[in-house]
Amino acid sequence: MTSVFLSLSALLTASVLAAPMAGSAPRTDGPAPVPSGWAAVDGAALERLAYAAGASQAPLAAGRTTSATAAEPELLALRSARNEKFVATEATYPAPNTGVLRARSAEVGGGWEGFAFEWDEPSATYALKSLANDRYVAVEKNYTGSAQNVLRARSASVGGWERFYLFYNEELDRYALQSTLNGLFVAMENSYTGSLQYALRARSTAITGSWEEFSLYGIGA
């Protein structure tokens, strides 16, 4: 497993990674405002980064499928900058939190911490498919309370609930995800207690620090 901590300088000359326009309110029809220093990562850029870091570029294992418009996915693991733990899919959690994403693993032990990043050219977004249960990650906008907007690997297909923008900060060598459903950035709930401690939620209006920042690691084929 290798960190996708490579400079985007060379990629900037070969691929357009344009930062969103400035604004004041989150949007559901496009990227929300992103702080200076962040840039959008398209499929070509992520492919180059993943390849250089030794990530798998092969199709998913037999029996797994990708969305119809997606290119071959990059197989990656996410690590929270807040608690330095890898994000895992809680496939054995009981309903209604079955498949919730939590930054709780000290290492990548298998499919629990693996995700296929599927790039969709028409929407310029990614869908994340968990290798733990072969389900797409969705934002639970209709949940209430502390679980509202929690990320869960629970969908068999991809729609607005399952699409994300991916951003990169070269100075920090970190990534951020933004939901297209509510225009909010994904944060890791470090201060939660109980079964949702370290859960990922699309709830931040800006990238304020390590709560919304992640590292990407390549997973071998």
Image (spheres, grey):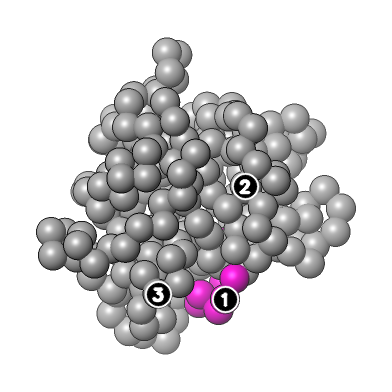
Which percent across, then down, holds residue 88?
64, 41
Report which residue position mark 2 lands on. Answer: 87
Which percent across, then down, holds residue 151?
60, 50
Instruction: Say what amino acid the circle numbered 1 marks.
Output: Gly
Instruction: Say what amino acid the circle numbered 2 marks.
Output: Val
Left or right placement of residue 195 versus residue 4 in this view:
right
Q: Quadrant of residue 100?
A: top right
The answer to whether the residue labelled 1 contacts the one labelled 2, judged by CB atoms less than 8 Å apart, is no
143 relative to 17, above or below: above
How far is mark 1 from mark 3, CA to CA? 13 Å
Magenta extent? 201-210
Q: SS for tag 1?
A: loop
Q: What numbered label is drawn on residue 171?
A: 3
- Who's the residue at 82% across and 48% down the image? 195
- Who's the residue at 77% across and 52% down the image? 196
Which percent across, then down, holds residue 20?
29, 74
Please state the total of marks drawn on the protein image. 3
Q: SS for tag 3?
A: loop
Report which residue position mark 1 lands on. Answer: 209
